[in-house]
Image (cartoon, rainbow, N blue to C red):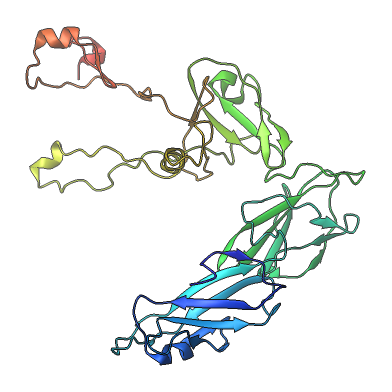
Amino acid sequence: VRPAHGQVTNHTAGGPVEVRLEFDRAMAPSVAGLARLDGEDVGFACASDSACDVITASLSPGSLAAGIHVVELLAGAADKDGVEMTAPFRSTFSVASGPSAIVEPARHHQPGLICLDGKAICHNAAGADALRIQNVGGNWTDWRPYENESDWDIVPGRGVLVQYHAEGSSSFIVGDCVDAAGHGCYASWHSEMFVRGGWNGWGLDSDGRMLLVGHHTWAANATFGGFQQAKFAPQPGWSKSYGIHPDRKLLYNLPDYDERHKSFKVEPYMSGSEASRRWMAARGHWSPHESMASGAPFAVELWVSSQCTAEAPTCPPPKDPQWTCVGFTGDEDQAWCESVGQVGCTEYAANDGSPLMES
């Protein structure tokens, strides 16, 4: 399909616009009558009378408004042998004459969002169907239909966030900030941020307050060696915090009547935030210094190190280390046990009969 799915184009001016659907086989000519653009029949036609494996529609310059457009092929479209599609096809593309919250969802600062001397919000999100607004640290308004301008009294020096809903997604969020003198200031998701870890007594020795140093960017200096665990919190307490997802453990073991359940063990598997970090780093999208944090209620402490990386240590120290009795396998014997020390992340030692090893 052309424009390609998710493509951002500028067709608000210039020459004719072609919308194109290509098939992997020759289709019945009737397929052209089942193609739609934004729910309308805009005159799709077969590009070739012999095969009809491509259908196109030519639109006049400027006929596509800024925003999201939907290309559909209705169910029932058949190939030349009469085999029909049992489900419809759907693709979207965006038209933009300039930057906007919808066509650039990764850009979260929008200069000029606060307008009319701090008395209004001027939106630039063509294609959105609903929005809501928040002074940073306050409550969101109810969702309302999209409008070009919203009456709003800002708090000088305090950011404003706007969230848009478009094409089934509400992941479009932008912010702006203006101080009392009318100068721009940094926009952020939160009005304050703290980082707490072992080096500051988890906020008891020092509160770990961070500084807003850029749009949606907080920073703090910390001095420590090796690895430390930490969490971010957007308020003095712990009512909300950000960390990483723990490894997922097996929820259901073998049934108790199966004797194998006593020794059956599946190592927990990596999930969520750490799996995403490794995927991004392995493909060159993130450096070793970049990661992500989750505000999920079950999120645990994340790792930081003196190398300024987000990787966990090779052998993370267990929270509740305990000795476990094991037998010998292969060439292992008592002499091996008393001399091997650590293998991988497991430490081996002879049972000395102490309370720690009595299990």
Q: Is residue 142 visible?
A: no
Left or right: 280, with 197 as reference point: left
**Which residue corresponds to the image point at 70% horizontal and 60% vertical from the top-left?**
100
* 58 shown above or below 307: below
Q: Quadrant of residue 339?
A: top left
Left or right: 163, with 296 as reference point: right
Residue 122 x/y as whole percent: 80, 62
Image quadrant occupied by the C terminus: top left
- Numbered-mark total: 0
Residue 171 x/y as whole percent: 59, 58
Q: Is residue 250 visible?
A: yes
Residue 176 x/y as whole percent: 77, 50
* 153 shown above or below 196: below
Q: Quadrant of residue 314?
A: top left
Left or right: 101, with 285 as reference point: right
Residue 231 x/y as whole percent: 55, 32
Left or right: 201, with 276 as reference point: right
Which one is in front, 109 or 151?
A: 109
**Which residue corresponds to the image point at 23% horizontal and 39% vertical from the top-left?**
266
**Which residue corresponds to the image point at 39% horizontal and 77% vertical from the top-left?**
23
